[in-house]
Amino acid sequence: MSERKITLSEKEIPERWYNIVADMPNKPRPPLHPGTKEPISPDMLAPLFPQALIEQEVTTEKWVGIPEEVRDFYSLWRPTPMFRAREFEKALGTNCRIYYKYEGVSPAGSHKPNTAIPQAYYNKQEGTKRITTETGAGQWGSALSFACHHFGLECEVYMVKISFNQKPYRKLLMNTWGAKVFASPSTETEAGRGILAKDPDSPGSLGIAISEAVERAAQRDDTKYALGSVLNHVLMHQTIIGLEAEKQMEIAGDLPDIVIAPFGGGSNFAGLTFPFLRHNLTEGKNIRCIAAEPASCPKLTRGVFRYDFGDTVGMTPLIPMFTLGHNFVPSPIHAGGLRYHGAGAIVSQLLHDKLIEAQSVPQLECFEAGVKFTGSEGILPAPEATHGIAIAAREARAADLAGTPKTILFNLCGHGYLDMAAYQSYFDGKIIDHELSAEEVQALIDQIDTPPVG
């Protein structure tokens, strides 16, 4: 097929999400209570999440139906387009075929509304009045603000302070949709005040912002908490990306050898790769699924598989994850959405079982790849998205050197038009690489005092 753009009709929006747990040879270990360290029961999650999402979190059903109202809302921008990156292929001088699924066409500019909308929908159905959350680069906060505005819910967002300062237009976008946004750590919560007392200049972290949002949700009966990544139901909602991509690859008459997506907590990666990984698990295919993470926050490539808290203060359940430790405060890189200390339980189990791969990539290599992509394909990628592009370029070069051209698919998870300050820093020579030393990684691991994964 010679066409560059591969589209689906509105009628082809998937009717069900895919739950990879049903096909995993080893299921994720259960979360543990932060106090007793015993497995938690679903009802213990009720103070934070509506019942429908709790049921999705623990289900082992392979397919979960998407409510018609959610599918209708999705149709504002879904199905999203897929492109054959012919100009990028020329720029790389590769014999590989490279495709990308473009999630930047959503109202919030990223893949995050795929889960924000169902989360807001289920909360509205069960009488929630307000939702609290955290956000790194602001993409998740923007998506939830958009969804809450649609369903008439209040939204309160704790945005990692370094990103709050680096990305003011993300904050303004959230404000436009009616959300209240606080730089985290803030003085609004006990958790934030405690962090600031120890470090008044703290740049913040997603772990700290989660602590603040969870604390606020626990204070009112009409308030719930929403998470933009990590948890099982969040990853499942995002599989709409890969389910569409499967159909689009069929239209293209192709099948990827390699599927790549950026990695922060897991939703971006899971969204594109899990439907393809299903073919490995159920049909014996050998599609390589690669998570692209920052070299400055390398939990998958250099962390340990342990039970750990999802937040800094230790308010959340303990999750079996690859982690650098919940006290880790990452370098203030511009890819704020990838600055998280741990990984979701499902992704961690898959990596532990060697069913997926992970590669880390330094910041300069990401921006170089992003600028090359913009010059050839005409879309400015978000800093997070450049990680997937950089790994796609790496894999293409490796395949060419080996004389075995591959079909490569990556997730262009969002545009960077609200991240121009990051590109300005790059062009001004202010972007530097940061990589943890072996001693720093070991010191972080030595601080982890949570239980090992059995």
Image: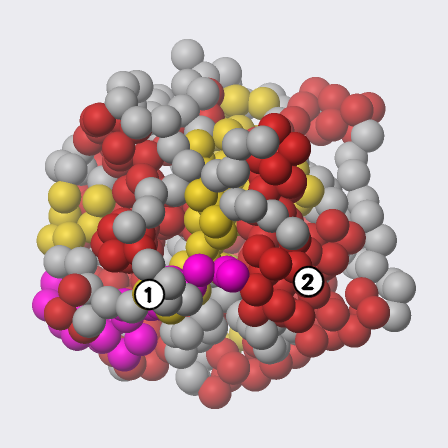
On residue 372, which mark appears? 2
Furthest residue to the top? 454
Q: Residue at x 41, y 66 (%)?
A: 4
**107 vs 118, nearest the viewer:** 107
The residue under label 2 is which amino acid type?
A: Lys
Closer to the camera, 182 or 284? 284
- Per the image, is 68 magenta? yes
Q: Residues within 10 Å of mark 1 (few under 14, many from 20)?
A: many
Q: Quick check: 419 left or right of 281?
A: right
Q: For this view, does 203 lie left or right of residue 356?
A: right
Q: Quadrant of residue 318?
A: top left
At numbered mark 1, what does the secondary structure look like: helix, strand or loop?
strand
Q: Amino acid at mark 1?
A: Ile
Q: Position of residue 316 (x, y in %)?
A: 44, 41
What segment is highlighted magenta in the picture? 66-86
Residue 106: name its quadrant.
bottom left
From this view, report whether residue 291 is shown above or below residue 53: above
Residue at 26% in and 34% down: 278
Q: Quadrant of the N terminus?
A: bottom left
In the image, 31 versus 344, the foreground residue is: 344
Judge whether residue 312 can be spotted in this image.
no
Give the residue at x 62% y 63%.
373
Residue under label 1 = 6
The one nearer the camera, 426 or 403, is 403
Indicate yes or no whether the magenta region holds residue 24.
no
Q: Residue at x 50, y 16 (%)?
A: 452
